[in-house]
Image: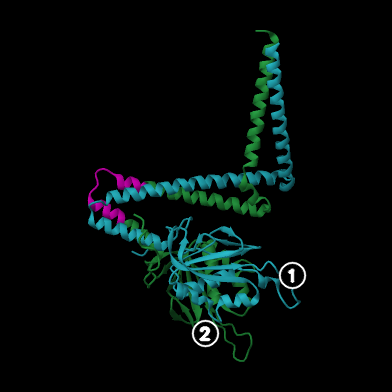
Amino acid sequence: MSKSKIAVAITIGIMSFMMIYVMLIQISIASDDDREEIEFLRETELKDLLASYKERYEETNEKIVEAKNKIDEYEKDEKSEEDTVALLEEEVKQAKMLLGYTDVVGEGVIVTMENNVIYGEEESAIVRASDLIELINELKLAGAEAISINDERIISRTDIFDVVPPLIHINGQRKASPFVIKAIGDINYLESALKIKGGFIDSYTLNNYKISIESKQEITINKYEGELTLNYINKEEVKK
Amino acid sequence: MNDKKQVSITIGLMCVVLTCAIVVQLNTIKEATKIVGTSYAEQSLKDEVLRWKENYESLYKNLEETEEKLEKARSEATQENGRGTELEGELSNINKLLGLTELTGRGVVVTLSDNTTVTSEGISVDEDINDYVVHDEDLRSVVNELYNAGAEAISINGQRLVNTSAITCSGTVITINGIKLNSPFVISAIGNPESLYSIERTGGYIELMRQTGAIAETTKSNNITVPKFSGALSSKYMRNVE
């Protein structure tokens, strides 16, 4: 083989390599649709987004481990019918707790909001349904796992309405001031979410409301007393 | 000689292809850097966000597969076990109520959108451009009315509302279940379509929103799909009272 042929072969080799390399970079840049979504986000938003993906990753990981453990339990060889029933009962208990079907206990905060009626004054502060909805939303955002207002458990389906003021309907039950809102969750998160400067407590105190917050290591929250049904879903495709 | 010709042609072709690839490549990079801006730190932050998004998404797929396996293992274990089958049914019903499964059924779809035909210059002085935009408070109020009218399951732009769902706003975007959403907001609610449609009543919140300037529309449907909740329902701090 002549020298020139070897040189040509090497040249072609290097060129092919470069070409493939360039194409790979090219493909990885061009195919990134996701990139467009975050293109105009500011740095703080990016950091928030990153934190939220990391958090969701962790949560998902925990759930996978949990599910795998359960699979192992169900697939154990020497297992009696009673064992299976016990496993299922535990799962049902756990699910009922998440749904709000059980009384629960844990650390958290208790917020008390009270009507502040000043006779003859315009600044009277009456607690409205919208105030309670806002407070519940703040608590959920701060990671509250269970919430109740005057012992009425707040679940996703809870509706809160002003009836003849100053009465408020919660889950169809009439409630009156003072409103005692209990929330179980991380005390630090819950407290700081409400106490932050310009936050919920600040703005309501400014508007003459009587509002206070205390944290406790043991708060008991009553179960949801109603019955939850699904009457309007398609029955035929109940998944087996 | 013939051999040499062939080689030259091959090299020639390759050069053309390579040049094309480089040109395309350079253009893409130019465009990308134009949008991205100049900060290298920001660029690497974006890369990290994308990497974690990918990580999360593939892990979530993994979770879905694992949960399917769990369901299978559960139903195999309860075969020929009367009490077990009963409990399994109860569990699957609770999971539906929790929002952990996709549901389809009858109900209404409420669409709320920003009125983009209006600009802050185009309105009179005593009007507020904010009245023409859908806020987190609007969504909370409409959802509250839907539950009052008997809604059994609700999602907004694909985000299922569960016990822990918060609806908040940061700047111009609305966040539900930690996911950012933009107008139009499509609220799908399963329940009695006639009752749910009562949110269109005079004096209701929908009417109020229309009066102030946002766009709202409610339609009944026999085929509503509400996706499942994709987050985690946590119980780190609460435990059952024994």
The colour assigned to chain A within the rendered structure: green
User: Which of label 2 and label 1 is nearer to you?
Assistant: 1
Chain bearing tag 2 is A
Q: Position of residue B147 (x, y in %)?
A: 47, 72
Label ID, residue A62: none
Quadrant assignment for the C terminus of chain A: bottom left
User: Which residue is pictured at 59% across the width and 79% down the height?
Assistant: A209
Q: Which residue is mark 2?
A: A166
Q: Position of residue A225 (x, y in %)?
A: 37, 73
Q: Give the residue type at disc 2.
A: Pro
Q: Which chain appears cyan?
A: B
Q: Which residue is mark 1?
A: B120
Of residues A126 and A160, which is closer to you in this image? Answer: A160
Vertical arrangement, residue B24 with respect to residue B220, above or below: above
Q: Quadrant of residue B212?
A: bottom right
Quick check: can you spot residue A30? yes
- Decide: few, some or many residues near mark 2? Use Cα within 10 Å; few <14, some 14-19, many ≥20: some
Of residues A39 and B178, which is closer to you in this image? Answer: A39
Vertical arrangement, residue A84 with respect to residue B106, above or below: above
Chain bearing tag 1 is B
Mark-to-mark CA distance, 2 and 1: 37 Å
Q: Which residues are magenta?
A: A69-88
Vertical arrangement, residue A166 with respect to residue A17, above or below: below
